[in-house]
Image (spheres, grey):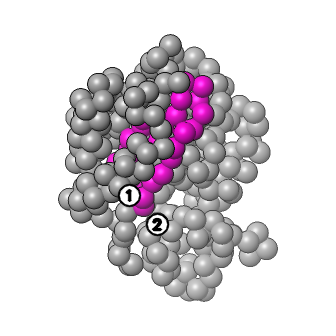
Amino acid sequence: MNVNIGIDTSCYTTSIVAIDDMKKILFEDRIVLPVKKGTFGLRQSDAFFHHVKNMPLLLDKCLNSVDRQSIRTVTVSDKPRQIEGSYMPVFTAGLNMAQLISSSLNCKLYTLSHQENHLYAVAHEVPLPKSFIGVHISGGTSEILKVTYDRGMTIDIIGHTLDLSFGKLIDRVGVYMGLDFPAGRVLDANRNSSEGIYQLKLSVKSTDFNISGFENKLKAYYDQEQNLVKVANTLFYYIGETLVKVLKTAQEEEGVSTIVVSGGVSANSYLRECLEGVFGDQIIFAKPTYATDHALGNAYYGSLQND
């Protein structure tokens, strides 16, 4: 049985996964990096420091859970996206560890972007078509993609936010209302349809969109009424409406029906219900636990290289 290791060191999570060539998960664990209350994240240097501390702990647990003599591949996120100049120091921590594993255990080393890792996490769960509309919505990225998929992925950005990412919007509004960072899960849990929504205005041009206006309006509504539940309802409703509008346009312009949604924001229960209600079986998500930052996609890609 071949063992394939995946490593991802994103801005907020250290993750290691091991799977076999039949896609069975043999080991998975991750450590969410600590963020001080009232702040909006970590500096790259601080996140890098935490990854360097976390990686040996996770690797030791992983190697004690699998047959290390059967490890054939190690795949790691080495940059945010599959474009020239894409770089973040945090991914160097994972890359260094992957290089050490590869040289020590004489296994093949592969690199993917963090964005590809998210998309391959969906592919682990559901067979994907040769061409699809990709959606990557997270704390750092909110992009609409045209993806050609075979043994690798060719990704073209066809739409994106013109200001904030959806993840930043959620966290800025949540922290403003006194929640801890990241705020998405708590806001999702506090939704209640009986409270209704406030009125906002969409700002969409083809497959590009602006959402910073949502932040200012929602903060003002909260100052007026202190109604966290209604703010949460409104926030996710208008994120959903924005996505529906741009994705319908993407389908029409690209002539592609299947939509694959990835990234931490896609774990939100309302957005899943909203998008599935509009697009039905045309839309595919990763399981919520694998939609957030996780190394499963990298491990799965490594397994494909043993065919």
Q: Picture coordinates of residue 40 (x, y %)?
A: 36, 68
Q: Is residue 119 above or below residue 58?
A: above
Task: Name the one closer to the observer, 238 or 299.
Answer: 299
Q: Is residue 167 above or below residue 84?
A: below
Name the residue: 52% across, 85% down: 223
The residue at which mark 1 appears reads as 12
- Between disc 2 and disc 1, the foreground one is 1
Name the residue: 27% across, 42% down: 97
Cα distance, mark 2 to mark 1?
Answer: 9 Å
Determine the main secondary structure of the stretch shown in magenta. strand
Name the residue: 39% across, 78% down: 37
The answer to whether residue 61 shows anywhere in this view is: yes
Disc 1 secondary structure class: loop
Q: Is residue 216 left or right of residue 75?
A: right
Q: Is residue 284 above or below residue 22?
A: below
Q: Picture coordinates of residue 89 (x, y %)?
A: 22, 48
Cβ–Cβ below 8 Å for labels 2 and 1? yes
* Mark 2 neighbour density, 10 Å: few (under 14) some (14–19) many (20 or more): many
Which range is magenta? 5-32
The residue at which mark 2 appears reads as 182
* Mark 1 neighbour density, 10 Å: few (under 14) some (14–19) many (20 or more): many
Task: Name the one closer to the observer, 15 or 158.
Answer: 15
Q: Is residue 155 left or right of residue 90?
A: right
Disc 2 secondary structure class: loop
Name the kind of residue labelled 1 in the image. Answer: Tyr
Name the kind of residue labelled 2 in the image. Answer: Pro
Residue 8 sits in quarter: top left
Q: Is residue 92 left or right of residue 169?
A: left
